Image (cartoon, helix red, strand yellow):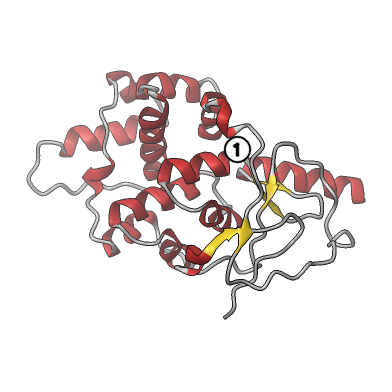
Amino acid sequence: MKKIFAAFVLMFAVLTGFAMAQDGRLAETPMTRFLADHYKVDPVVVLSLQQRMNKYEDDTSVALYLAKLADIDPMKMLDPRLSGKSWKQLMDDSDLEVKLLFIDLPKEAAKNERFAYIYSQIEKNKNTKNFSPVLYDANIRDLIQLRLLKEAFGIAPSAAIKKLAKGSSFTEIIEQSMPEKYLEDSVSPTVDNYKVPVKKSDANTLPRIEAPRVRAIVIPKGGYEAGEVNTIRSAKPGTEAIPNR
């Protein structure tokens, strides 16, 4: 039973874009470092989003991109999203126009089951004064991730759509395209102005999983709130950062 549970946790970690430290805690991965660098935020912000916004693996990138457009702390996207608001509603709340998401899609996208609806909305609305396309969460995820691939790696939407049609996920395409620097080991972080108690292993409740090329950045169970990561500098391995609330 323990082996089955351990396998499930490992699969969950891989699918959601983060790994587990040896004592079962969230640990930084190449994807964490890449997203933090691309969106210019602290890795702790990315980890906290990954921890709590884990139903869809692309949602972390969506939150980071929309927060960047709105010039707000990404963590401010978290609670409204978890309360049930759609990405379109969050864009409306932040006065962000949907057309900011649109990119040039190839004509063959019209024949692709996944992108045909998005393509039709772009074509239908691109020359209208009152730009009011109807987009769903899945559409917004796809548009933002297509933009990320183009901006970060120069992958054209047409090439990305072909890879997706063959069964690849956005996460797989990103990981395959990452420069080596994101795959290398890096120095563990430390924390200033935080209590840093050594926490006993959670081995009784969580399996120990070997996760190569990761470093532990421990996130409180409820995740960090907006603004709390501003004082974070670094933390010794095996310690937990707890804000002085």
Instruction: Tell me the amino acid under the disc marked 1.
Output: Pro
Expressed as whole percent of the image width and height from the top left, the position of residue 203 reads 87, 58
Q: Which picture quadrant has residue 151? A: top left
Q: Image height check: is 244 above or below 77?
A: below
| Most distant residue in the left direction | 129
Residue at x 58% of width, y 53% of height? 47
| Most distant residue in the front direction | 192
Q: Image height check: is 125 above or below 113?
A: below
Q: Residues within 10 Å of mark 1 (few under 14, many from 20)?
A: many
| Most distant residue in the bottom direction | 245
Q: How many marks?
A: 1
Expressed as whole percent of the image width and height from the top left, the position of residue 217 reads 65, 55
Expressed as whole percent of the image width and height from the top left, the position of residue 195 reads 66, 73
Could you tell me which quadrant the C terminus lies in? bottom right
Q: Which residue is mark 1?
A: 30
| Residue 233 in the figure: left or right of residue 188 | left
Q: Which picture quadrant has residue 140? A: top left
Expressed as whole percent of the image width and height from the top left, the position of residue 220 reads 64, 67
Q: Which picture quadrant has residue 162? A: top left
Residue at x 36% of width, y 20% of height? 158
| Residue 230 in the figure: left or right of residue 238 | left
Q: Secondary structure at mark 1?
A: helix
Of residue 6 and residue 137, the one placed in the foreground of this image is 6
Q: Image height check: is 131 above or below 87?
A: above
Q: Image height check: is 132 above or below 227?
A: above
